[in-house]
Image (cartoon, coloured by chain):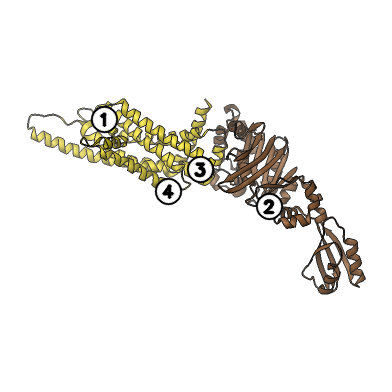
Amino acid sequence: MTAIRNIGAIVQKEWRHYFGSPIAYVTLFVWTLLFGIFFYFAFTLFLRQSMMMAQQMEFGGGPKLSLNEYLIRPVMHNMAVVALFLAPMLTMRLFAEEKRQGTIELLATSPVSDLQIVLGKFFAAVGLYALMILAGLVNLLVLWRYASAAPEWKPIATGALALLLFGACFIALGTFVSTLTRNQIIAGILSFCLFLGIWTLGWADDPAAGPAMKVVSYLGVTTHMEDMVKGVLDLKDVVFYLSFIAFGLLLAQLSVESQRWRA
Amino acid sequence: MIEVENLTKRYGRHTAVDGVSFKVQKGEILGFLGPNGAGKTTTMRILSCYLPPTEGSARVAGHDVFEAPMEVKKRVGYLPETPPLYPDMDVEAYLDFVAKIKAVAPKSRKARIDDAIEKCRIGDVRHTLIGRLSKGYRQRVGLAQATLHNPEVLILDEPTAGLDPKQIIETRELIRALGGDHTIVLSTHILPEVSMTCGRVVIINKGKVVAEDTPENLTHRLKGAGALRLEVRGETGPVFDAIRVVPGVATVHPKPPAGSGVVTFEIEAEAGKDVRADLARAVVQRGFDLLGLAQVGMSLEEIFLHLTTTDAALESAAPASLETTEVTA
Protein backbone atom coordinates (compact mmCIF):
# COMPACT_ATOMS: atom_id res chain seq x y z
CA MET A 1 0.00 0.00 0.00
CA THR A 2 2.76 2.41 0.91
CA ALA A 3 4.63 1.10 -2.13
CA ILE A 4 1.80 2.15 -4.39
CA ARG A 5 1.56 5.51 -2.65
CA ASN A 6 5.29 6.10 -3.07
CA ILE A 7 5.25 5.13 -6.73
CA GLY A 8 2.19 7.31 -7.22
CA ALA A 9 3.92 10.28 -5.61
CA ILE A 10 6.88 9.90 -7.96
CA VAL A 11 4.69 9.48 -11.04
CA GLN A 12 2.83 12.63 -10.07
CA LYS A 13 6.07 14.51 -9.56
CA GLU A 14 7.46 13.40 -12.92
CA TRP A 15 4.27 14.46 -14.66
CA ARG A 16 4.60 17.81 -13.03
CA HIS A 17 8.05 18.08 -14.59
CA TYR A 18 6.87 16.89 -17.98
CA PHE A 19 4.01 19.35 -18.07
CA GLY A 20 5.77 22.10 -16.17
CA SER A 21 8.46 22.15 -18.82
CA PRO A 22 8.14 22.13 -22.60
CA ILE A 23 9.04 18.41 -22.79
CA ALA A 24 5.48 17.07 -22.70
CA TYR A 25 4.13 19.68 -25.10
CA VAL A 26 6.97 19.32 -27.59
CA THR A 27 6.84 15.53 -27.68
CA LEU A 28 3.03 15.52 -27.87
CA PHE A 29 3.13 18.13 -30.61
CA VAL A 30 5.82 16.39 -32.67
CA TRP A 31 4.18 13.02 -32.24
CA THR A 32 0.67 14.11 -33.21
CA LEU A 33 2.01 16.22 -36.07
CA LEU A 34 4.02 13.31 -37.50
CA PHE A 35 1.11 10.95 -36.92
CA GLY A 36 -1.09 13.34 -38.87
CA ILE A 37 1.43 13.69 -41.71
CA PHE A 38 2.04 9.96 -42.02
CA PHE A 39 -1.66 9.33 -41.84
CA TYR A 40 -2.27 11.87 -44.59
CA PHE A 41 0.33 10.36 -46.89
CA ALA A 42 -0.84 6.82 -46.24
CA PHE A 43 -4.37 8.00 -46.81
CA THR A 44 -3.69 9.61 -50.20
CA LEU A 45 -1.69 6.57 -51.24
CA PHE A 46 -4.53 4.37 -50.17
CA LEU A 47 -7.03 6.43 -52.17
CA ARG A 48 -4.85 6.26 -55.28
CA GLN A 49 -4.48 2.52 -54.91
CA SER A 50 -8.19 1.96 -54.40
CA MET A 51 -8.83 4.10 -57.46
CA MET A 52 -6.45 1.99 -59.54
CA MET A 53 -7.98 -1.19 -58.23
CA ALA A 54 -11.38 0.08 -59.15
CA GLN A 55 -10.21 0.92 -62.67
CA GLN A 56 -8.61 -2.47 -63.16
CA MET A 57 -11.70 -4.28 -62.00
CA GLU A 58 -13.85 -2.27 -64.38
CA PHE A 59 -17.45 -2.48 -63.45
CA GLY A 60 -16.67 -5.52 -61.38
CA GLY A 61 -16.34 -3.67 -58.07
CA GLY A 62 -13.46 -6.01 -57.13
CA PRO A 63 -12.09 -6.68 -53.66
CA LYS A 64 -11.94 -3.57 -51.49
CA LEU A 65 -8.54 -2.74 -50.04
CA SER A 66 -8.54 -3.27 -46.31
CA LEU A 67 -8.17 -0.04 -44.34
CA ASN A 68 -6.35 -1.88 -41.59
CA GLU A 69 -3.93 -3.54 -43.92
CA TYR A 70 -3.10 -0.67 -46.25
CA LEU A 71 -3.65 2.42 -44.17
CA ILE A 72 -3.38 1.83 -40.45
CA ARG A 73 -0.55 -0.70 -40.46
CA PRO A 74 1.99 1.46 -42.32
CA VAL A 75 1.15 4.38 -40.05
CA MET A 76 1.79 2.23 -36.99
CA HIS A 77 5.13 1.16 -38.38
CA ASN A 78 6.12 4.72 -39.09
CA MET A 79 5.15 5.76 -35.60
CA ALA A 80 7.39 3.04 -34.19
CA VAL A 81 10.28 4.84 -35.89
CA VAL A 82 9.15 8.12 -34.36
CA ALA A 83 9.02 6.42 -30.96
CA LEU A 84 12.63 5.41 -31.46
CA PHE A 85 13.51 9.10 -31.62
CA LEU A 86 11.17 10.41 -28.96
CA ALA A 87 11.69 7.79 -26.24
CA PRO A 88 15.16 9.12 -25.33
CA MET A 89 13.63 12.57 -24.87
CA LEU A 90 11.24 11.14 -22.30
CA THR A 91 13.82 9.15 -20.38
CA MET A 92 17.09 11.04 -20.57
CA ARG A 93 16.39 13.38 -17.71
CA LEU A 94 14.73 10.87 -15.37
CA PHE A 95 17.80 10.17 -13.24
CA ALA A 96 20.47 12.34 -14.83
CA GLU A 97 18.64 15.48 -13.78
CA GLU A 98 18.14 14.26 -10.22
CA LYS A 99 21.85 13.60 -9.98
CA ARG A 100 22.83 16.94 -11.44
CA GLN A 101 20.45 18.85 -9.16
CA GLY A 102 21.42 16.82 -6.12
CA THR A 103 17.78 15.90 -5.58
CA ILE A 104 18.77 12.25 -5.79
CA GLU A 105 19.93 12.77 -2.19
CA LEU A 106 16.38 13.65 -1.22
CA LEU A 107 14.97 10.53 -2.88
CA ALA A 108 17.70 8.29 -1.52
CA THR A 109 17.29 9.52 2.06
CA SER A 110 13.50 9.21 2.02
CA PRO A 111 11.79 6.01 3.10
CA VAL A 112 11.28 4.98 -0.52
CA SER A 113 13.01 1.96 -2.05
CA ASP A 114 15.17 2.22 -5.15
CA LEU A 115 12.77 -0.01 -7.04
CA GLN A 116 9.86 2.27 -6.16
CA ILE A 117 11.81 5.24 -7.49
CA VAL A 118 12.64 3.41 -10.71
CA LEU A 119 9.07 2.20 -11.18
CA GLY A 120 7.63 5.63 -10.48
CA LYS A 121 9.82 7.21 -13.12
CA PHE A 122 9.17 4.43 -15.61
CA PHE A 123 5.40 4.60 -15.23
CA ALA A 124 5.46 8.37 -15.53
CA ALA A 125 7.28 8.18 -18.86
CA VAL A 126 5.10 5.31 -20.11
CA GLY A 127 2.03 7.27 -19.06
CA LEU A 128 3.04 10.25 -21.15
CA TYR A 129 3.89 7.94 -24.04
CA ALA A 130 0.47 6.26 -23.80
CA LEU A 131 -1.10 9.70 -23.92
CA MET A 132 0.85 10.39 -27.10
CA ILE A 133 -0.42 7.20 -28.69
CA LEU A 134 -4.01 8.01 -27.76
CA ALA A 135 -3.65 11.52 -29.15
CA GLY A 136 -2.35 10.06 -32.41
CA LEU A 137 -5.18 7.56 -32.68
CA VAL A 138 -7.64 10.44 -32.78
CA ASN A 139 -6.64 10.78 -36.45
CA LEU A 140 -8.26 7.46 -37.16
CA LEU A 141 -11.67 8.67 -36.06
CA VAL A 142 -12.00 10.25 -39.47
CA LEU A 143 -12.24 6.75 -40.95
CA TRP A 144 -15.27 5.86 -38.87
CA ARG A 145 -16.89 9.11 -39.86
CA TYR A 146 -16.33 8.90 -43.62
CA ALA A 147 -15.21 5.46 -44.78
CA SER A 148 -17.88 3.34 -46.43
CA ALA A 149 -16.66 0.28 -44.54
CA ALA A 150 -15.33 1.19 -41.10
CA PRO A 151 -11.97 -0.33 -40.15
CA GLU A 152 -11.84 -3.17 -37.67
CA TRP A 153 -11.07 -1.91 -34.20
CA LYS A 154 -9.30 -5.01 -32.96
CA PRO A 155 -6.14 -4.72 -35.10
CA ILE A 156 -6.02 -1.05 -34.15
CA ALA A 157 -6.16 -1.95 -30.46
CA THR A 158 -3.48 -4.62 -30.73
CA GLY A 159 -1.41 -2.32 -32.94
CA ALA A 160 -1.62 0.43 -30.35
CA LEU A 161 -0.71 -2.09 -27.66
CA ALA A 162 2.28 -3.19 -29.73
CA LEU A 163 3.36 0.41 -30.09
CA LEU A 164 2.96 0.91 -26.35
CA LEU A 165 4.90 -2.20 -25.36
CA PHE A 166 7.58 -1.53 -27.91
CA GLY A 167 8.03 2.04 -26.64
CA ALA A 168 7.91 0.85 -23.02
CA CYS A 169 10.91 -1.41 -23.75
CA PHE A 170 12.89 1.60 -24.86
CA ILE A 171 11.66 3.64 -21.92
CA ALA A 172 12.76 0.93 -19.49
CA LEU A 173 16.21 0.78 -21.06
CA GLY A 174 16.37 4.56 -21.29
CA THR A 175 15.59 4.79 -17.58
CA PHE A 176 18.57 2.55 -16.96
CA VAL A 177 20.87 4.59 -19.20
CA SER A 178 19.78 7.76 -17.42
CA THR A 179 21.05 6.34 -14.13
CA LEU A 180 24.56 6.09 -15.57
CA THR A 181 25.32 9.77 -15.99
CA ARG A 182 24.51 13.15 -14.58
CA ASN A 183 24.41 14.64 -18.05
CA GLN A 184 21.03 14.50 -19.79
CA ILE A 185 22.46 14.92 -23.27
CA ILE A 186 24.84 12.02 -22.83
CA ALA A 187 21.99 9.90 -21.46
CA GLY A 188 19.86 10.86 -24.47
CA ILE A 189 22.53 10.08 -27.06
CA LEU A 190 23.52 6.80 -25.41
CA SER A 191 19.90 5.71 -25.17
CA PHE A 192 19.27 6.54 -28.79
CA CYS A 193 22.33 4.59 -29.98
CA LEU A 194 21.32 1.65 -27.82
CA PHE A 195 17.76 1.70 -29.13
CA LEU A 196 18.99 1.94 -32.69
CA GLY A 197 21.29 -1.03 -32.14
CA ILE A 198 18.43 -3.11 -30.76
CA TRP A 199 16.21 -1.98 -33.60
CA THR A 200 18.67 -3.23 -36.21
CA LEU A 201 18.71 -6.67 -34.59
CA GLY A 202 15.29 -7.09 -36.12
CA TRP A 203 16.80 -6.80 -39.60
CA ALA A 204 18.39 -10.19 -39.12
CA ASP A 205 14.90 -11.63 -39.40
CA ASP A 206 15.32 -13.70 -42.53
CA PRO A 207 13.58 -17.04 -43.13
CA ALA A 208 16.81 -18.44 -44.57
CA ALA A 209 18.92 -17.35 -41.61
CA GLY A 210 20.78 -19.82 -39.42
CA PRO A 211 19.82 -20.51 -35.79
CA ALA A 212 22.25 -17.93 -34.42
CA MET A 213 20.75 -15.17 -36.50
CA LYS A 214 17.29 -16.35 -35.50
CA VAL A 215 18.17 -15.77 -31.87
CA VAL A 216 19.54 -12.35 -32.70
CA SER A 217 16.46 -11.37 -34.62
CA TYR A 218 14.27 -12.67 -31.84
CA LEU A 219 15.82 -10.10 -29.55
CA GLY A 220 15.01 -7.32 -31.99
CA VAL A 221 12.05 -5.50 -30.52
CA THR A 222 10.47 -4.84 -33.92
CA THR A 223 10.05 -8.49 -34.91
CA HIS A 224 7.49 -8.98 -32.18
CA MET A 225 5.38 -6.12 -33.41
CA GLU A 226 4.47 -7.67 -36.75
CA ASP A 227 1.74 -10.01 -35.64
CA MET A 228 0.28 -7.59 -33.16
CA VAL A 229 -0.01 -4.85 -35.74
CA LYS A 230 -1.82 -7.33 -37.96
CA GLY A 231 -4.26 -7.94 -35.15
CA VAL A 232 -2.89 -11.21 -33.83
CA LEU A 233 -2.27 -11.03 -30.11
CA ASP A 234 0.21 -13.76 -29.32
CA LEU A 235 1.09 -14.41 -25.71
CA LYS A 236 4.73 -15.03 -26.55
CA ASP A 237 5.12 -11.54 -27.99
CA VAL A 238 3.54 -9.95 -24.92
CA VAL A 239 5.73 -12.04 -22.66
CA PHE A 240 8.77 -11.02 -24.67
CA TYR A 241 8.00 -7.34 -24.25
CA LEU A 242 7.16 -7.65 -20.58
CA SER A 243 10.38 -9.52 -19.84
CA PHE A 244 12.35 -6.98 -21.84
CA ILE A 245 10.80 -4.20 -19.75
CA ALA A 246 11.44 -6.06 -16.51
CA PHE A 247 15.05 -6.57 -17.53
CA GLY A 248 15.53 -2.86 -18.25
CA LEU A 249 13.98 -1.88 -14.93
CA LEU A 250 16.07 -4.42 -13.06
CA LEU A 251 19.22 -2.96 -14.61
CA ALA A 252 18.08 0.52 -13.59
CA GLN A 253 17.41 -0.58 -10.02
CA LEU A 254 20.76 -2.35 -9.73
CA SER A 255 22.52 0.66 -11.14
CA VAL A 256 20.87 3.05 -8.67
CA GLU A 257 21.70 0.72 -5.81
CA SER A 258 25.30 0.07 -6.82
CA GLN A 259 26.07 3.73 -7.30
CA ARG A 260 25.57 4.28 -3.63
CA TRP A 261 28.15 1.65 -2.90
CA ARG A 262 30.62 3.12 -5.31
CA ALA A 263 29.89 6.79 -4.65
CA MET B 1 19.95 9.33 20.04
CA ILE B 2 22.87 9.03 17.66
CA GLU B 3 25.70 6.61 18.30
CA VAL B 4 28.58 6.52 15.90
CA GLU B 5 31.22 3.92 16.51
CA ASN B 6 34.50 3.63 14.69
CA LEU B 7 32.91 4.78 11.47
CA THR B 8 35.12 4.44 8.41
CA LYS B 9 34.43 5.23 4.80
CA ARG B 10 36.87 4.56 2.00
CA TYR B 11 36.56 5.58 -1.59
CA GLY B 12 38.95 3.21 -3.28
CA ARG B 13 42.30 3.96 -1.67
CA HIS B 14 41.21 7.29 -0.27
CA THR B 15 39.93 7.21 3.29
CA ALA B 16 37.37 9.97 3.75
CA VAL B 17 36.30 9.08 7.27
CA ASP B 18 38.68 7.20 9.50
CA GLY B 19 37.40 5.62 12.70
CA VAL B 20 35.11 8.39 13.84
CA SER B 21 33.15 7.85 17.07
CA PHE B 22 30.81 10.18 18.88
CA LYS B 23 27.44 10.25 20.58
CA VAL B 24 24.66 12.76 20.52
CA GLN B 25 22.07 12.91 23.29
CA LYS B 26 18.40 13.57 22.69
CA GLY B 27 17.63 17.25 22.19
CA GLU B 28 21.27 18.19 21.83
CA ILE B 29 22.72 20.34 19.06
CA LEU B 30 26.06 19.00 17.92
CA GLY B 31 28.36 21.09 15.75
CA PHE B 32 30.50 19.27 13.30
CA LEU B 33 33.51 21.36 12.51
CA GLY B 34 36.34 20.89 10.09
CA PRO B 35 38.03 22.21 6.99
CA ASN B 36 36.71 21.34 3.56
CA GLY B 37 37.32 17.71 2.72
CA ALA B 38 37.63 16.69 6.37
CA GLY B 39 34.88 14.11 6.05
CA LYS B 40 31.96 16.05 7.47
CA THR B 41 29.67 15.57 4.48
CA THR B 42 30.57 11.89 4.19
CA THR B 43 29.76 11.29 7.85
CA MET B 44 26.45 13.09 7.49
CA ARG B 45 25.62 11.15 4.36
CA ILE B 46 26.21 7.92 6.22
CA LEU B 47 23.99 9.08 9.09
CA SER B 48 21.22 9.90 6.64
CA CYS B 49 21.59 6.51 4.89
CA TYR B 50 22.72 8.03 1.63
CA LEU B 51 26.00 6.13 1.73
CA PRO B 52 26.80 2.83 3.42
CA PRO B 53 29.79 2.84 5.78
CA THR B 54 32.85 0.78 4.89
CA GLU B 55 33.47 -0.15 8.52
CA GLY B 56 32.01 0.63 11.90
CA SER B 57 28.43 1.35 12.74
CA ALA B 58 26.07 4.23 13.18
CA ARG B 59 22.80 4.01 15.04
CA VAL B 60 20.13 6.64 14.85
CA ALA B 61 17.27 6.45 17.35
CA GLY B 62 18.26 2.87 18.06
CA HIS B 63 18.26 1.71 14.44
CA ASP B 64 21.38 0.84 12.54
CA VAL B 65 21.81 2.84 9.32
CA PHE B 66 22.90 -0.26 7.48
CA GLU B 67 20.62 -2.91 8.99
CA ALA B 68 17.41 -0.88 9.06
CA PRO B 69 17.80 2.09 6.71
CA MET B 70 14.05 2.53 6.22
CA GLU B 71 13.50 2.97 9.95
CA VAL B 72 16.34 5.47 10.12
CA LYS B 73 15.12 7.38 7.07
CA LYS B 74 11.70 7.81 8.68
CA ARG B 75 13.31 9.41 11.72
CA VAL B 76 15.89 11.61 10.05
CA GLY B 77 15.47 14.93 8.29
CA TYR B 78 18.43 15.68 6.08
CA LEU B 79 19.48 18.92 4.44
CA PRO B 80 22.39 18.28 2.07
CA GLU B 81 24.96 20.93 1.25
CA THR B 82 22.96 22.04 -1.77
CA PRO B 83 19.28 21.95 -0.85
CA PRO B 84 17.65 19.20 -2.94
CA LEU B 85 15.07 21.34 -4.73
CA TYR B 86 13.20 21.02 -8.00
CA PRO B 87 13.39 24.43 -9.68
CA ASP B 88 10.29 23.86 -11.78
CA MET B 89 7.99 23.17 -8.82
CA ASP B 90 6.43 25.77 -6.58
CA VAL B 91 7.17 25.63 -2.88
CA GLU B 92 3.88 24.11 -1.85
CA ALA B 93 3.89 21.44 -4.55
CA TYR B 94 7.46 20.58 -3.62
CA LEU B 95 6.65 20.20 0.05
CA ASP B 96 3.59 18.17 -0.86
CA PHE B 97 5.78 15.77 -2.82
CA VAL B 98 8.30 15.55 0.00
CA ALA B 99 5.51 14.87 2.50
CA LYS B 100 4.30 12.00 0.34
CA ILE B 101 7.66 10.30 -0.03
CA LYS B 102 8.51 10.92 3.64
CA ALA B 103 5.45 8.87 4.56
CA VAL B 104 3.57 11.68 6.27
CA ALA B 105 0.04 10.40 6.89
CA PRO B 106 -2.36 11.86 4.29
CA LYS B 107 -4.57 13.27 7.03
CA SER B 108 -1.84 15.33 8.66
CA ARG B 109 -0.07 16.28 5.43
CA LYS B 110 -1.69 19.67 5.07
CA ALA B 111 -1.05 20.54 8.70
CA ARG B 112 2.59 19.45 8.52
CA ILE B 113 3.19 21.52 5.38
CA ASP B 114 1.57 24.58 6.94
CA ASP B 115 3.60 24.08 10.07
CA ALA B 116 6.91 23.77 8.21
CA ILE B 117 6.09 26.80 6.06
CA GLU B 118 5.32 28.84 9.14
CA LYS B 119 8.37 27.68 11.10
CA CYS B 120 10.75 28.37 8.25
CA ARG B 121 8.97 31.62 7.34
CA ILE B 122 8.43 30.88 3.68
CA GLY B 123 4.71 31.71 3.65
CA ASP B 124 5.17 34.63 1.26
CA VAL B 125 6.79 32.44 -1.41
CA ARG B 126 4.37 29.57 -0.99
CA HIS B 127 3.23 29.68 -4.60
CA THR B 128 6.50 30.84 -6.15
CA LEU B 129 8.52 28.57 -8.41
CA ILE B 130 11.58 27.38 -6.54
CA GLY B 131 13.78 28.32 -9.49
CA ARG B 132 12.89 31.97 -8.91
CA LEU B 133 13.76 31.99 -5.21
CA SER B 134 16.81 33.68 -3.75
CA LYS B 135 19.53 31.65 -2.10
CA GLY B 136 18.21 32.45 1.37
CA TYR B 137 14.72 31.31 0.57
CA ARG B 138 16.01 28.15 -1.06
CA GLN B 139 17.94 27.30 2.05
CA ARG B 140 14.80 27.82 4.11
CA VAL B 141 12.73 25.67 1.79
CA GLY B 142 15.46 23.05 2.18
CA LEU B 143 15.14 23.33 5.93
CA ALA B 144 11.35 23.07 5.67
CA GLN B 145 11.86 19.91 3.66
CA ALA B 146 14.08 18.43 6.36
CA THR B 147 11.67 19.21 9.20
CA LEU B 148 8.53 18.34 7.28
CA HIS B 149 7.91 14.86 8.64
CA ASN B 150 8.77 16.03 12.16
CA PRO B 151 11.83 13.79 12.44
CA GLU B 152 13.52 13.04 15.72
CA VAL B 153 16.91 13.81 14.24
CA LEU B 154 17.91 16.65 11.93
CA ILE B 155 21.12 16.45 9.94
CA LEU B 156 22.06 19.77 8.42
CA ASP B 157 25.08 20.04 6.15
CA GLU B 158 26.31 23.63 6.24
CA PRO B 159 22.89 25.16 6.72
CA THR B 160 24.18 28.73 6.56
CA ALA B 161 26.59 28.40 3.63
CA GLY B 162 26.18 31.14 1.08
CA LEU B 163 23.68 33.20 3.04
CA ASP B 164 24.02 36.90 3.79
CA PRO B 165 24.64 37.96 7.41
CA LYS B 166 21.00 38.69 8.15
CA GLN B 167 19.90 35.36 6.76
CA ILE B 168 22.64 33.62 8.71
CA ILE B 169 21.33 35.09 11.95
CA GLU B 170 17.77 34.12 11.07
CA THR B 171 18.79 30.60 10.15
CA ARG B 172 20.72 30.20 13.39
CA GLU B 173 17.73 31.34 15.38
CA LEU B 174 15.60 28.89 13.49
CA ILE B 175 18.00 26.04 14.22
CA ARG B 176 18.13 26.97 17.89
CA ALA B 177 14.35 27.03 18.00
CA LEU B 178 14.23 23.58 16.44
CA GLY B 179 16.77 22.34 18.95
CA GLY B 180 14.30 21.62 21.73
CA ASP B 181 12.18 19.11 19.84
CA HIS B 182 14.82 17.65 17.58
CA THR B 183 18.28 16.27 17.99
CA ILE B 184 20.44 18.20 15.57
CA VAL B 185 23.78 17.54 13.96
CA LEU B 186 25.02 20.44 11.88
CA SER B 187 28.25 20.96 10.04
CA THR B 188 29.91 24.23 9.38
CA HIS B 189 33.20 25.92 8.97
CA ILE B 190 31.93 29.20 10.32
CA LEU B 191 33.05 29.11 13.91
CA PRO B 192 30.90 31.71 15.67
CA GLU B 193 28.01 29.66 14.45
CA VAL B 194 29.14 26.80 16.61
CA SER B 195 29.51 28.84 19.77
CA MET B 196 26.14 30.42 19.10
CA THR B 197 24.06 27.40 18.26
CA CYS B 198 25.74 24.24 19.40
CA GLY B 199 25.92 22.65 22.80
CA ARG B 200 28.85 20.51 21.80
CA VAL B 201 31.48 20.52 19.09
CA VAL B 202 33.23 17.71 17.31
CA ILE B 203 36.25 18.92 15.38
CA ILE B 204 37.18 16.63 12.56
CA ASN B 205 40.23 16.75 10.34
CA LYS B 206 41.37 14.37 7.60
CA GLY B 207 38.63 11.97 8.59
CA LYS B 208 39.55 11.83 12.26
CA VAL B 209 38.06 13.42 15.34
CA VAL B 210 40.69 15.76 16.80
CA ALA B 211 38.64 17.28 19.61
CA GLU B 212 35.22 16.97 21.17
CA ASP B 213 33.85 19.30 23.84
CA THR B 214 31.58 22.25 24.52
CA PRO B 215 32.64 25.44 22.71
CA GLU B 216 33.33 27.13 26.09
CA ASN B 217 35.56 24.33 27.31
CA LEU B 218 37.49 24.23 24.08
CA THR B 219 38.17 27.94 24.31
CA HIS B 220 39.00 27.66 27.98
CA ARG B 221 41.33 24.71 27.64
CA LEU B 222 43.42 26.29 24.99
CA LYS B 223 43.64 29.64 26.65
CA GLY B 224 47.11 28.88 28.00
CA ALA B 225 48.28 28.62 24.48
CA GLY B 226 46.93 32.05 23.65
CA ALA B 227 49.25 34.77 22.53
CA LEU B 228 50.30 37.89 24.39
CA ARG B 229 50.24 41.33 22.86
CA LEU B 230 53.01 43.61 23.99
CA GLU B 231 53.14 47.31 23.24
CA VAL B 232 56.41 49.11 23.87
CA ARG B 233 57.79 52.57 23.06
CA GLY B 234 61.10 52.05 21.30
CA GLU B 235 62.82 50.59 18.28
CA THR B 236 61.77 47.21 16.93
CA GLY B 237 65.29 45.73 16.88
CA PRO B 238 66.48 46.33 20.46
CA VAL B 239 63.10 45.52 21.98
CA PHE B 240 62.95 42.29 20.02
CA ASP B 241 66.37 41.32 21.34
CA ALA B 242 65.30 42.14 24.89
CA ILE B 243 62.18 40.00 24.95
CA ARG B 244 63.47 37.12 22.90
CA VAL B 245 65.78 36.04 25.65
CA VAL B 246 63.09 35.97 28.35
CA PRO B 247 62.84 32.36 29.54
CA GLY B 248 59.63 30.64 28.49
CA VAL B 249 59.05 32.73 25.38
CA ALA B 250 58.51 30.51 22.38
CA THR B 251 57.96 32.86 19.47
CA VAL B 252 57.98 36.61 18.95
CA HIS B 253 56.28 38.23 15.98
CA PRO B 254 56.80 41.94 15.46
CA LYS B 255 53.67 43.65 14.16
CA PRO B 256 53.85 46.43 11.63
CA PRO B 257 54.63 49.65 13.57
CA ALA B 258 51.65 51.84 14.36
CA GLY B 259 53.84 54.97 14.13
CA SER B 260 55.15 57.46 16.71
CA GLY B 261 57.78 55.07 18.01
CA VAL B 262 55.39 52.45 19.36
CA VAL B 263 56.08 48.85 18.45
CA THR B 264 53.80 45.90 18.98
CA PHE B 265 54.74 42.26 19.30
CA GLU B 266 52.76 39.10 19.44
CA ILE B 267 54.36 36.63 21.75
CA GLU B 268 53.58 33.00 22.29
CA ALA B 269 54.77 31.41 25.46
CA GLU B 270 55.76 27.82 25.91
CA ALA B 271 52.80 25.81 26.99
CA GLY B 272 51.74 26.17 30.59
CA LYS B 273 54.12 29.04 31.37
CA ASP B 274 53.03 32.50 32.38
CA VAL B 275 55.74 34.83 31.13
CA ARG B 276 53.93 38.10 31.67
CA ALA B 277 55.82 39.19 34.79
CA ASP B 278 59.20 38.30 33.30
CA LEU B 279 58.35 40.08 30.09
CA ALA B 280 57.34 43.27 31.85
CA ARG B 281 60.49 43.25 33.95
CA ALA B 282 62.73 42.65 30.96
CA VAL B 283 61.21 45.51 29.03
CA VAL B 284 61.38 47.99 31.89
CA GLN B 285 64.89 46.96 32.96
CA ARG B 286 66.19 47.69 29.49
CA GLY B 287 64.75 51.17 29.78
CA PHE B 288 61.81 50.90 27.39
CA ASP B 289 58.38 52.19 28.26
CA LEU B 290 55.88 49.40 28.63
CA LEU B 291 52.61 50.66 27.20
CA GLY B 292 50.53 47.55 27.20
CA LEU B 293 50.63 43.85 27.88
CA ALA B 294 47.49 41.88 27.26
CA GLN B 295 46.50 38.30 26.81
CA VAL B 296 44.96 37.65 23.45
CA GLY B 297 42.41 34.96 24.18
CA MET B 298 42.36 32.29 21.55
CA SER B 299 39.22 32.48 19.51
CA LEU B 300 37.58 29.35 18.20
CA GLU B 301 39.06 30.18 14.82
CA GLU B 302 42.55 29.92 16.20
CA ILE B 303 41.79 26.74 18.10
CA PHE B 304 40.35 25.34 14.95
CA LEU B 305 43.44 26.25 12.99
CA HIS B 306 45.66 24.86 15.70
CA LEU B 307 43.83 21.59 15.70
CA THR B 308 43.49 21.20 12.00
CA THR B 309 46.50 22.75 10.30
CA THR B 310 49.78 21.30 11.48
CA ASP B 311 50.44 18.61 14.00
CA ALA B 312 53.61 20.43 15.04
CA ALA B 313 51.65 23.52 16.00
CA LEU B 314 49.22 21.31 17.84
CA GLU B 315 51.90 19.65 19.90
CA SER B 316 53.84 22.77 20.78
CA ALA B 317 50.80 24.85 21.51
CA ALA B 318 48.42 22.65 23.34
CA PRO B 319 49.75 19.41 24.76
CA ALA B 320 48.07 20.14 28.08
CA SER B 321 44.68 20.37 26.50
CA LEU B 322 45.20 17.30 24.42
CA GLU B 323 45.58 15.10 27.45
CA THR B 324 42.03 15.68 28.42
CA THR B 325 40.64 15.77 24.92
CA GLU B 326 39.37 12.58 23.45
CA VAL B 327 41.61 11.87 20.53
CA THR B 328 40.62 9.12 18.21
CA ALA B 329 43.71 8.23 16.30
Classify residue A3 as left or right of residue A240.
Answer: right
Task: Please state which amino acid type lies under the numbered disc 3.
Answer: Glu
Instruction: Provide the secondary structure element on which disc 2 rests.
Output: helix
Disc 3: host chain: A
Q: Residues within 10 Å of mark 1 (few under 14, many from 20)?
A: some
The verdict on a common chain for dots 3 and 2 is: no
- Mark 2 and mark 1: span between their CA atoms? 68 Å
The verdict on a common chain for dots 1 and 4 is: yes
- Mark 2 and mark 4: span between their CA atoms? 40 Å
Q: Residues within 10 Å of mark 4 (few under 14, many from 20)?
A: some
Residue B109, horizontal then vertical, whole percent: 59, 31
Which chain, by letter, is yellow? A
Which chain, by letter, is brown? B
Q: Is residue B316 above or below residue B240?
A: above
* Mark nearer the N terminus (4 vs 3): 3
Q: Nearer the viewer, residue A9 or A109?
A: A109
Instruction: Provide the secondary structure element on which disc 1 rests.
Output: helix
Task: Please state which amino acid type lies under the numbered disc 4.
Answer: Ile
Q: Residue B130 sits in which quadrant?
A: top right
Judging by the rendered image, the residue that carries numbered circle 3 is: A98
* Mark nearer the N terminus (1 vs 3): 3
The verdict on a common chain for dots 2 and 1 is: no
